[in-house]
Amino acid sequence: MSNDVVVDIKGLAKHFGDRVVFDNVSLAVHKSEVVAIIGPSGVGKSTLIRCVNHLHPFNAGTIDVLGYHLQGDVAPSKPMLRELRSRVGMVFQTFNLFPHLTVLDNIILGPIEVKRLPRAQVTERAMDLLAMMGLQQRAQMYPKRLSGGEQQRVAICRALAMEPEIMLFDEPTSMLDPELVGEVLEAIRRLAKQGMTMLLVTHEMMFAKDVADTVVVMADHTVAERGPARQVLESPQTERARAFLRRVLNPGLSSDGARRQRGGV
């Protein structure tokens, strides 16, 4: 793996019983690169990024992440997984905040329990993150008092509190009302400007075009196309990618659907 490649996926295959999710997927992600993964529902986009931190084991192929080697059908050790996941943050579709903890306590729990860092140090870092997300006034609130967009930004803060080197985003806006999408996308845009390496599963095409360095189109159990974001989204080279993009960018969609697919808020 070259010095600036931080995720190197080779020949990856994932099956659920007899159902092939994807097969022979290869992808290299460089330090500070933002990779957006798009494609029809059910093609394994979320499964792919969950393989990167081994939330999903896989059947064949290899993934090298920050020097950690994962191999199909070989269970990694628990200590290695703990180390890997402490360096690879993840934000899910659902917020998964602890309802009985305040916003601040949700954020500081991981660094204190997993990294054994001093509470004062972690709290200072958490408040800086909340300020970056415009949520410093929400620190002592409980999640149920926050909007969906605010909860998702807290979830991003929680992941960043572990000081990850890579961030995985699994459709972070899919559970939000359209008017709340923009605030979460803006938070991700700020991370991109700061040089965070990211893999982002998204249906927000215009956001991918604006923020991502690379776009990967998954379809038919594999990678249909990958390349520079603007090239893939404006002039796809494969018929499979063209067919998918024609469908999701079709102006004949309902106004709400079109707005979401185009990345509008």
Image (cartoon, grey):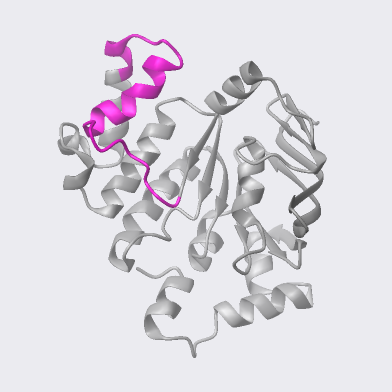
Q: Residue at x 56, y 29 (%)?
A: 165
Tell me if I can see residue 208 in this picture: yes
Residue 109 magenta = yes
The image quadrant of residue 98 is: top left
Residue 240 as seen in the image, left or right of residue 191: right
Q: Can the viewer see residue 36?
A: no
Q: Position of residue 35 (x, y in %)?
A: 62, 50
Which residue is drawn at the image coordinates 37% and 15% (left, top)? 112
| 113 over 189 or under it: above or below | above
Residue situated in front as seen by the camera: 176 or 193: 176
**Image quadrant where one finds the N terminus:** top right
Up-down relation of residue 198 to residue 136 (above or below):
below
Q: Which residues are magenta?
A: 93-122
Magenta highlight on residue 103: yes
Q: Which image quarter: residue 76?
A: top right
Front-most of residues 186 and 17: 17
- Tell me where residue 227 appears, x and y as whole percent: 72, 59
Across and down, in percent, residue 9 comes to 77, 42
**For residue 97, above or below residue 122:** below
Quadrant of the rendered structure where residue 214 is?
Answer: bottom right
Task: State the residue lying farthest toward the front.
Answer: 17
